Image: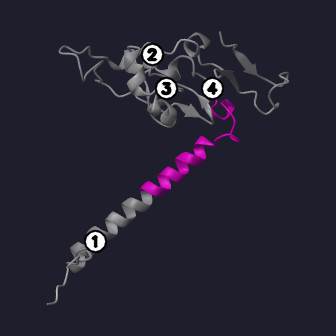
Amino acid sequence: MTELTTCDSTSTHYDKHYKNYYVYNNVFYCLTFPKEWASSHLPNSGPSECELCQKVGFWNGAFIGYCVKCADIYNFERGMGFIDIGEENIYENYYIKQKKEKNPIKIDKNTFMEKSAFSTYLKNVNPDDIGNKEICDSLELISKKVEIILAEKERKLKEVLRKTLYGEEEKEESHTVSTSV
């Protein structure tokens, strides 16, 4: 059985700056993430086995919640599922097991809010108090992502304006092969 360790300033194994999470099976978890969940992930779910959880379920290097795919596996009893870094799926009219069930269960907004990670174990938790920004700064990642999205939107807008105002099409390289005999 793996030992559950809380990283705090009294721990000799971790630096005092690493006090905002606990470690289980070499994964950093937000201090408020239920320890019974950390020790009972189903196969192919959670931070060690799910690629999407690894991409969207962490904040400042600490696991804060399951991705929407894994939340579905747990019938949304462990949160509504994250869809991006720090963004939980809280959209109305999401259907449980919508991809496989013939008669999916509709979840209303109140149920969403009751089961949301931000309404339960992350309620009143300051994002700066989660994990360690030296490991990963989530706000910095989001800022970079926004910059990329805005740059792409600007490029597309310029392209539309160029086409609209000047009738110019984006020039594509022609790939003609010349043959001489």
Among numbered discs 3 and 2, the one appearing first in the sequence = 3
Of the two numbered discs 1 and 4 in the rendering, the one whose residue sits closer to the viewer: 4
Reading the image, the residue beneath label 3 is 49
The residue at the point 65 percent across, 30 percent down is: 130
Of the two numbered discs 2 and 4 in the rendering, the one whose residue sits closer to the viewer: 4
SS for dot 4: strand
The residue at the point 76 percent across, 27 percent down is: 19
171 displayed left or right of 70: left
- Range of residues picked out in magenta: 126-149
Residue 6 bears which disc, if any? none
Reading the image, the residue beneath label 2 is 115
Q: Position of residue 152 (x, y in %)?
A: 39, 60
Of the two numbered discs 3 and 1 in the rendering, the one whose residue sits closer to the viewer: 3
Of the two numbered discs 3 and 2 in the rendering, the one whose residue sits closer to the viewer: 3
Reading the image, the residue beneath label 1 is 161
Q: Compared with residue 105, is residue 136 higher up or lower down, i.e. above or below?
A: below
Query: Closer to the camera, 134 or 25?
Result: 25
Reading the image, the residue beneath label 4 is 27
Among numbered discs 2 and 1, the one appearing first in the sequence = 2
**How far is the residue under mark 3 from the one under mark 4?**
11 Å
Among numbered discs 2 and 4, the one appearing first in the sequence = 4
Q: Position of residue 146 (x, y in %)?
A: 48, 52
Q: Are marks 2 and 4 in contact (CB under 8 Å)?
A: no
**How far is the residue under mark 3 from the one under mark 2?**
23 Å
Amino acid type, callout 4: Val
Disc 4 crowd rating (10 Å Cα; few below 14, some 14-19, many 20+) is: some
Disc 3 crowd rating (10 Å Cα; few below 14, some 14-19, many 20+) is: few
**How far is the residue under mark 1 from the one under mark 4?**
48 Å
Amino acid type, callout 3: Glu
147 displayed left or right of 60: left
**Image quarter (top left, top right, bottom left or bottom right) of the N terminus:** top right
